Amino acid sequence: MLEIKNLHVKLEEEDKQILKGVDLSVEAGSVHAIMGPNGSGKSTLSYVLSGRDGYEVTDGSATLDGEDLLDLEPEERAAAGLFLAFQYPVEIPGVGNMTFLRTAVNAQRKARGQEEISAADFLKTVRERAKSLKINADMLKRPVNVGFSGGEKKRNEILQMAMLEPKMCILDETDSGLDVDAMKLVSEGVNALRDEGRGFLVITHYQRLLDHIKPDVVHIMANGRIIKSGGPELALEVEQNGYADILAEAV
Amino acid sequence: MALADRKPDATEDRLAAMTLPEGGCIMPAREAALARLRDMGLPNRRDEYWKYTRPDTLVQADALPAALFDAGEAPMFSQFDRLKIVFVDGVFDPEASDDLMMEGVRIDRIADICCKDIHWAKDLYGVLETRGQTPVARPLAALNTAFAQDGVAIHITGKPSKPISLIYFHRSETSDAILHHVIRVEPGAEATILENGPAAARFNKCMEIDIADGGTLHHVRAQGRDHERRAVTHMFARLGTESVFKSFTLTVNGVLTRNEAVIELTGDDAVAHVAGACVGDGEFHHDDTVFITHDAVNCESRQVFKKVLRNGATGVFQGKILVKAGAQKTDGYQISQSLLLDDDSQFLAKPELEIYADDVACSHGSTSGAIDEDALFYLRSRGVPEGEATDLLTLAFLAEAVDEIEDKALAEDIVERLESWLARRR
């Protein structure tokens, strides 16, 4: 589903190479996790895939179901089925959460040549999905993420994911800033979306999240590359011994 | 010859072709205004108060022509039940207007008052304008008082069941209109005044509003969208004890607009809110000049102005809060913000506070900024195309000003218009 080959990326503004040849393949129905020390390029990978400005791809490719992602605008990538759950969800004063969700759902439907969802159907679906994430009516009415707690923001990300029903979900440190209960709630939200047609790429620092969202494959990223891949046991190894051994091994 | 020395000449040039409308009880007010005007002289670009806006085209003898604009949509407020008072190129149109009778209000034409020796408007016409001439001269308002061809005197004695809607059509490319309205709100009375339309190629409008103790007036205005129109408007308001005045203006298009609001809080516990949302594109210059004087205890004033500017448009805000000695417990708030959608557009702001009382809370802020790139990317990453996302953020930016409108149906009408206009430009 998601195929990343030899991806090289540098910061546009400074001549600094961040990704130095990332190879990664996420199949439909599977959950891949990326772990790695700070500054290894994990978040950069998620931003580059979703089309954020400020990065220059110097080599390599990234495709989603064969479609070249790097050639598309961010909204086209979204319509193609890519979703990034932000590490730091953005506050948008003046734009109601509900308006935002409906605009996004309809924009994607339009891009795919589908009809707009009716107001009634939309409302029903939103309420249902919000309820399971313990997002109350007030949060839906408020401006996007404004005045939301860290946990509320992350739950709101998962709600967006649930409404947009993407093919490929990237979760960028979704566990950061979450307490144990919130992490459980968010994980349940993610697990509810696990589906044989959907792939997940979960970026995290900690093994803890992977207790809740069980990965099929774990990758260790360091210095702009994936240096080791393995099963869920790799995450446990990191948790116990840190990255030092793996890094030493890779050199 | 220095520009200042040419001022009397420039003023006489303008006056040469004008004659004072004759007769009636407001004649002395017109004559006094003319004398005041000769004393002050019409403004030129050397005047400090006109530093950011060139008054030339508002001052010169002949109005520049303005092409008519077919918006291809129903005029603002069309779907609301209201009492319509229609002016075409600055002249009252009785055919297009409703019967001016409604319970709780009495409406007369200024032109009719001119034939009468006694009328309540005599005590208001030119009175607030005169008060508003200090500490800053407003010569174009004096010109208006002297020469206004038409307008209405609205006497609100109760609570009329529907808004009074002043509609200004622009039908002649060379029209040069001067309208003067006076509005008196009696104690405890309450009404809503709507205004919309471009009015003329050049429009000089003055509105004097006197709100007695416990009176309330809501004012919602949408200035016409004709690209080439020019307008200078003055709104002078005096507020009595526990009275409320809330004014909102929407401005889209128009090559030149100068809106002055001069508000005096003269009775304790009075509330004055004045807000504006403006969308400027290309050759567009929009100036909000506001002067609010607190001259009583425990009054509240709010100024909320938001301007979206692109393709080289210019926005101006000059806003002042003057708190006189003794005006304790004043709560004054002023915010002016611009959203600049490109590098060619500019926003010029001059916020001022002048405070002579020691127990007051006054705050002001002015910002200029581009669209929030993080928010834009966030929206796009959810599939919202760039243009639509920009519009959504633009509307969000304007929302704080539109929220000042108390009537939610009116506010919604404004938002819907803004949405469709923004979408059309994409």
Image (cartoon, coloured by chain):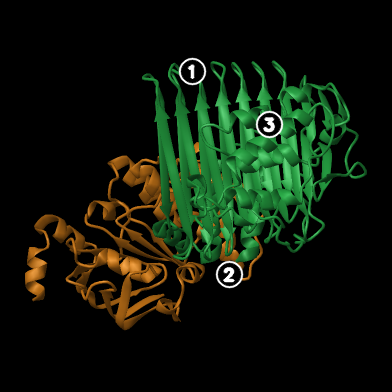
Mark 2 or mark 3: which is in front? 3
- Image quadrant where one finds the N terminus of chain A: bottom left
Residues tagged by mark 2 and mark 3 found on one chain of the structure: no
Of residue B205 and residue B267, the one placed in the foreground of this image is B205
Tag 1 and tag 3 share a subunit: yes
User: What's the colour of chain A in the image?
Assistant: orange
- Rendered green, the chain in question is B
Residue A65 % position (x, y): 45, 77
Q: Which of these two is toward me, B325 or A136? A: B325
* Furthest-bottom residue in this view: A59
Q: Viewer-proximal residue, A187 or B46?
A: B46
Of circles 1 and 2, which is in front? 1
Task: Tell me residue A90's x, y (percent).
Answer: 39, 52
Residue B410 higher or lower than B59, as above or below = above
Classify residue B321 as left or right of residue B21.
left
The residue furthest front is: B1
Using the image as rendered, state which of residue B195 and residue B160 is in the foreground.
Answer: B195
Separation of marks 1 and 2 at Cα, in angstroms? 55 Å
Label 2 vs label 3: CA separation? 53 Å
Judged from the image, the secondary structure of the residue bearing numbered disc 2 is helix
Q: Which chain carries label 3?
A: B
- The residue under label 2 is A111
Name the side, left or right, on which B61 lies relative to A178.
right
Q: Earlier in the sequence, mark 1 or mark 3?
A: 3
- Residue displayed at 47% across by 46% down: B48
Which residue is the site of mark 3?
B208
Q: Answer yes or no: do the residues labelled 1 and 2 have beta carbons within 8 Å?
A: no
Q: Quadrant of the C terminus of chain A?
A: bottom left
Element type where label 1 sits in the image: loop
Q: Where is residue B318 in the image (x, y as percent from the top left)?
A: 49, 43
Q: In this view, does B289 lie above or below A194?
A: above
